[in-house]
Amino acid sequence: MQTDDPTFIQQLQKQDPEAFRILLDEYDRRVYSIVYRMIPHREDIEDVAQEAFVEIWRALPRFRHDARLSTWIHRIATNVCLEHRRKKRGPENISLDDMLPVFEGPEESTEALVERNDLKDRVGRCVNQLPEIYRQVIVLHELQGYTYREVAKMLRLPEGTVKSRLNAAFVKLRESLSPHLAEMNPATEVRGL
């Protein structure tokens, strides 16, 4: 059964346990992926993911069909992560491996590899230092691959605000990285910077 099927969604809204098991099978990895990328403390990931699924279960009767089910689930998972971070208020880190898609170009030498790893570390530190409003859109749009519209729905913002925050985030990253980018090998390109 398709998880976007209206009959299936009705079963979910009635909190049918079997329908919810199917939903878990379908969305387990996606929710964990969001939590992994948004929660800085690895020891909290399991608890936050469980909390996200509990919140999804509680909210199912209120699902209004104004978004795709997948977008609605991701919005709840994102909100649970944001709420957890607000409570913790500790240092936040985005996995540096999540930044790999930003880098393009072949590895030409050991020197190029060292340079690329140094850049990856700098970009990761700069992303982690961004204010939360910018870090959210970077994680959701650039790392998770959501469209502007999907990010807007998840964060309950106008699409234009998402675009402007993403643009501002890249401006801030460019400013933070400009001294290093000037020293880089010109063959190494960084998308968006």
Image (cartoon, grey):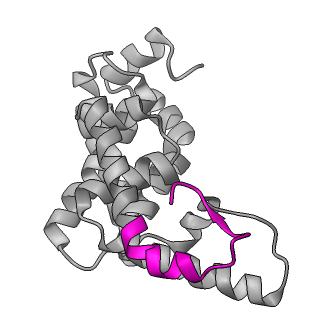
Where is residue 38 shown, x and y percent of the image? 37, 61
At x 29%, y 32%, the residue is 160
At x 51%, y 81%, the residue is 180
Can the viewer see residue 53? no
Where is residue 155 shown, x and y percent of the image? 26, 40
Q: Is residue 40 above or below residue 111?
A: above
Residue 150 or residue 25, whichever sits in front:
150
**Residue extent of the magenta highlight:** 174-193
Q: Left or right: 120 with respect to 55? A: right
Decide whether residue 189 is among the magenta residues: yes
Can the viewer see residue 119? yes
Where is residue 77 shown, x and y percent of the image? 34, 47
Q: Is residue 46 above or below residue 11?
A: below
Q: Left or right: 71 with respect to 182? A: left
Where is residue 145 shown, x and y percent of the image? 53, 44
| Position of the N terminus by quadrant | top right
Which quadrant of the figure has residue 133? bottom left
